[in-house]
Amino acid sequence: MKMTIANHPIALAMFGLAVPWSTVVGAAVIDPELEAAMQTGADVAFIGQFSERVDLGAFPGQGQGRGMRLAALLWALRNLADASQKSAVELLKAGGANRIIKLWSINALAATASPDVVRELAALPEVETIKLDATLAAPGLAPAASAPSEWNLEAVQVPAVWDQGLTGAGSVVAGMDTGVDAFHPDLVGRWRAGSNSWFDPNGEHPTPYDPSGHGTGTMSVAVGGDAGGTSIGVAPGAEWIAVKIFNDAGVASLSGIHQGFQWLLDPDGNPATADIPDVVNNSWGFANQAGQCYLEFQPDLEVLKAAGIAVVFAAGNQGNLGSVSPANNPDGFGVGAVDSTLSVTWTSSIGPSPCDGSIFPEVVAPGVGIRAADLGSGYQSISGTSFAAPHVAGAIALLRQAHPGASVGALEQALMASATDIGPAGADNTYGHGLLNLPVALDLLGTLPPPGPVCTDVDGDTFFAEADCGTPVDCADLDPAINPAACDIKGDGIDQNCDGVDRRSGKACPTADGGTGKNK
C-alpha cells in the first residue's frame, strides 16, 4: 500500500571543495501522491531529492578511530548539499516556504510550501524528485506471557562472552524509537549524556523521554543492567544515545526519520569529534507494505555504513505476508524472532527480500516473552521482532569492544557465518542464517585478518589523508592545492606543503602572470 496524503498516517509496525560524486540522470518528478495533495491548494509538506551524490566508495567504512576519514566524509556531504541546494533554498525562502530542513547526509531537503512554489522547485534542473513528506503511525506494545528470566540471553550465550571480560565497554548503541526513559534503574547510568546523546526532531523534549515504553524496552534489551535482580541487557557495559523519531502522539514523518539518521553521523555538529555510535537499532518498519521493496531510507543506510555505523532492523511481524522495509533493503540487516523452544514465531516476517532476492532475515534472535525495562522502574514481558533486533545491536557493541577496528561488513559477515543453523540445512528465508551465537561470532571475527589501512584521497591529488598509505599525510584532503608536494607561499596564512610552517618551499611556484618564480 502506498502513501496517500501528507497527514494520513501510514501503518508503521513497531516491531515489537572538490569532492567525488556521481549524478543520477532523470528529470525532476513530482510524486503522484504529492500531486494529489497539492490539488487542495493548501501548503504541503514535501521532501526534495537532488541529483548529485557523494561517491561513498571514497570513504570505506571501518571501526572506531575513524577521525580524519569520517570528518572528510561529513564535510564532503555538507559541501555538496550546500552547492547543490543553494538555488532551491533561495527559491523556497522567496516563496514563503517554512520548515526548511537541509538533509545534507542524502543531499535532500524537507520543507512546507504552496503548490506553486513546489512546481517552481520541480523546474530546477538539479532537483531529481519531490515526494510527499508523509507520516507514520506507531502502534503500542504487544504484551506476552511470562518466561524464565534471562532465557533470551542464555539462548544466544551472552554470559560466555561476559566471562571473557567483554560487556560492551567503550561502545555506543543508538536507538531510533519512541524515546527512552533515562531514569529507569537499568538505563540511568548508561546514557552517554549531553546534547550529543539525545535528539528529538519533533522538538518536543530536550532531554530523554518516552511516552509509550517501546523505546525503553528495546534499549534495555541492548544495554540494560541488573537493577531488578536479573540481567536483561546484552551489553550492560555499553553507553546509549537515542533519537525520538515518533512524537508524543505516536507519529513520525519521513523527514524526521531522515533527520534522525543524519544526526547519528555527527551528533554534536562538529565533524572533527568522534562521537558517532557503533550501531543503531531500528525496531520499526512499513508493516502495510509487507512483501514490497520501499527504498526511501536506503541512501541513509549507505551513508551510515560508510561512516562505520552498523544498522540493525527488526524483521517485522507480518509472518508469511513477507519481509518489510527498510529491513529488507540492500543495506538493511533484518532480525527475526524465535521463542524459548528456538522455533521461529508464526508472526516473524519471512523472505526473500523483494529488493534484491537475498535471504531474509539475516539472523534470528529471541523475541517472545522478553523481560525488558518499562516506564518508571518496572519491567514488562513483551514479544515481537522489535525485541529480537536489540539482541543483535547489543552483540555488535560486544564485538566492537573486542575488535574496535572491525568494519560493518566484517561484523555482519561474522554474525551470519557464526549463527547456529536451527532450521532447514543452510540459510533459508525463515531462520535466515540461523540463531545469533555470540561466542562463535567473537571467535570468527578474531580469525579475520586485521583491516588494512584506510586510504582516503577525496581531492584526487594522489596524497592520502591517513598514515601508512605509501605517501606523506595530506593535511587537507578537501583541497588538491594543499598536500606535501605543493608549493608553500610565504605569508599567505596557508601551509600549502603540510610541513607545519607557512613559508616558501624553495620550489618553482606559479606567479601572478602565470609564469613561475623561484621561492626562497
Image (tube, rainbow, N blue to C red):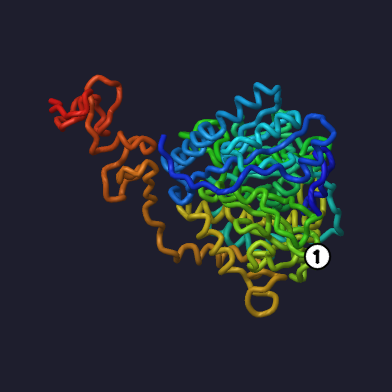
Of 233 and 217, the residue lying toward us:
217
Q: Is residue 379 above or below residue 348?
A: above
Residue under the point 74% across and 38% down: 181
Residue found at the far top of this picture: 491
State whether residue 192 appears in this view: no
Q: Where residue 38 sits: x, y (%)?
A: 79, 36
**Image position of 327 (left or right of 82):** right
- The type of residue carrying mark 1 is Leu
The quadrant the C terminus occupies is top left
> Which residue carries the number 1 mark?
321
State whether residue 312 appears in this view: yes
Image quadrant where residue 118 sits: top right
Q: Where residue 16 sits: x, y (%)?
A: 78, 53
Of 218 and 373, the residue lying toward us:
218
Q: Where residue 89 sits: x, y (%)?
A: 61, 28
Residue under the point 47% across and 41% down: 73
Of 297 and 319, the residue lying toward us:
297
Of 385 and 120, the residue lying toward us:
120
The quadrant the N terminus occupies is bottom right
Residue found at the far bottom of this picture: 425
**Image position of 223 (left or right of 439):** right
Q: Secondary structure at mark 1?
A: helix
**Image position of 193 (left or right of 481):** right
Q: Is residue 316 above or below residue 81?
A: below
